[in-house]
């Protein structure tokens, strides 16, 4: 992040036009020809040849080594485009360099809004895991055969933000959605301890039931998390819970919804049984979430 911020501060409006043109051109090209970058950006070809060399050296774009001169965006370049949009929109004023968390598919940093609110800034990073594997489990990719890592991350962020917009007004305990752009989601900052760190709990059964209650309300609202585990629960002071990381959600009426819900519950009940000695059967938990009539049994 330090390098990204350093580069971000050096970029001119014309540089952002060029980066944006590369982004747009990648809808049709793996590497966008410099002639098309010039056409899309409105910057002369001479300047394009000069500035793309600098942007390439900064690590914001990558040059094709082949039969023509072309460029594609790197993750750093995509980060700069998203940050520029968030700053221009007035959503973000500053961002801390030390991450709050680094995961397989995202990095989360603390930021500061223009109103002075501390916020969470989440960068989706789906390129870290197998592309074929993520395709198999992510409904939002659909039948697209050709999809870049950057666009896949953008879809994940859009999907997650949509879930938060649905859930937060219904009082499901999730971060408050603020804004998103490209692969970055900005939400309220949640302070607490991740459940996977096994924080000492005064009443583990109450905590588990609190998680299940929120899963139930989410289900009734029309949302199934789809990837719930101890890594997606934050324990706040007072042992209140917050459920995070919603890019894989599916509608409650999705053909795989009950399978995914059962898997979510199975992960949680196994964790609480193993770490806290608390036992709730998967069937008992499922029955508190889905009525027999709704399941058609």
Image (spheres, rainbow, N blue to C red):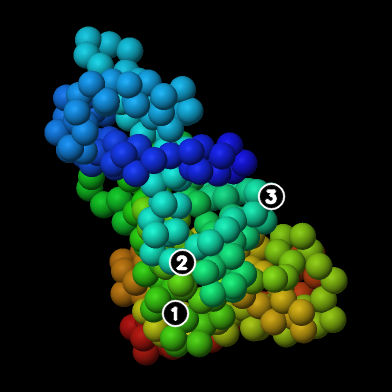
* Marks 2 and 3 close (CB-CB < 8 Å): no
Q: Which residue is mark 1?
A: 167
The answer for how far apart the CA atoms under marks 2 and 1 are is 21 Å
**Residues packed near mark 2 inside 10 Å, few (<14), some (14 to 19) or many (20 plus):** many
Name above or below for residue 116 compared with residue 137.
below
- Looking at marks 2 and 3 on the same chain, the residue that comes earlier in the sequence is marked by 2
State which quarter of the image contains the N terminus.
top right
| Residue 57 point in image, percent of width and height | 46, 22
**Residues packed near mark 3 inside 10 Å, few (<14), some (14 to 19) or many (20 plus):** few
**Residues packed near mark 1 inside 10 Å, few (<14), some (14 to 19) or many (20 plus):** many
Please state which of the two labelled residues, at mark 2 or mark 1, is closer to the viewer: 2
Residue for point 18% across, 37% down: 42
Residue for point 44% across, 79% down: 167
The answer for how far apart the CA atoms under marks 3 and 1 are is 29 Å
The answer for how far apart the CA atoms under marks 2 and 3 are is 20 Å
Q: Which residue is mark 2?
A: 91
Residue for point 45% across, 52% down: 83
Name above or below for residue 184 compared with residue 266.
above
Please state which of the two labelled residues, at mark 3 or mark 1, is closer to the viewer: 3
Residue nearer the viewer, 6 or 219? 6
Question: Is residue 129 in view from this perspective?
Answer: no
Q: Which residue is mark 3?
A: 98
Query: Residue lying farthest top?
Result: 67
Q: Quadrant of residue 43?
A: top left
Report the side of 101 relative to 225 (left or right): right
Name above or below for residue 251 compared with residue 50.
below
Q: Quadrant of residue 276?
A: bottom right
- Looking at marks 2 and 1 on the same chain, the residue that comes earlier in the sequence is marked by 2
């Amino acid at each position: 992040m330090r390098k990204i911020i350093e580069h971000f501060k050096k970029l001119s409006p014309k540089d952002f036009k060029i980066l944006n043109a590369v982004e747009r051109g990648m809808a049709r090209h793996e590497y966008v020809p410099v002639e098309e970058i010039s056409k899309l950006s409105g910057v002369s070809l001479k300047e394009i040849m000069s500035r793309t060399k600098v942007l390439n050296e900064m690590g914001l774009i990558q040059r094709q080594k082949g039969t023509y001169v072309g460029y594609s965006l790197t993750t750093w370049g995509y980060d700069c485009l998203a940050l520029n949009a968030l700053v221009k929109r007035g959503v973000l004023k500053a961002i801390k360099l030390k991450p709050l968390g680094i995961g397989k598919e995202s990095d989360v940093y603390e930021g500061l809004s223009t109103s002075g609110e501390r916020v969470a800034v989440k960068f989706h990073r789906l390129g870290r895991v197998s592309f074929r594997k993520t395709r198999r489990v992510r409904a939002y990719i659909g039948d697209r055969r050709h999809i870049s890592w950057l666009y896949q991350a953008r879809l994940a962020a859009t999907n997650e933000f949509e879930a938060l917009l649905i859930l937060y007004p219904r009082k499901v305990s999730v971060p408050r959605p603020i804004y998103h752009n490209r692969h970055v989601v900005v939400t309220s900052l949640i302070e607490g301890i991740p459940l996977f760190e096994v924080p000492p709990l005064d009443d583990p059964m109450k905590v588990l039931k609190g998680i299940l209650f929120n899963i139930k309300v989410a289900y009734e609202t029309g949302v199934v998390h789809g990837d719930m585990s101890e890594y997606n629960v934050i324990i706040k002071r007072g042992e209140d819970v917050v459920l995070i990381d919603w890019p894989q959600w599916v509608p409650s009426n999705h053909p795989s919804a009950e399978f995914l819900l059962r898997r979510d519950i199975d992960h949680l009940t196994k964790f609480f049984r193993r770490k806290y000695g608390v036992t709730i059967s998967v069937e008992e938990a499922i029955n508190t979430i889905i009525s027999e009539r709704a399941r058609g049994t």
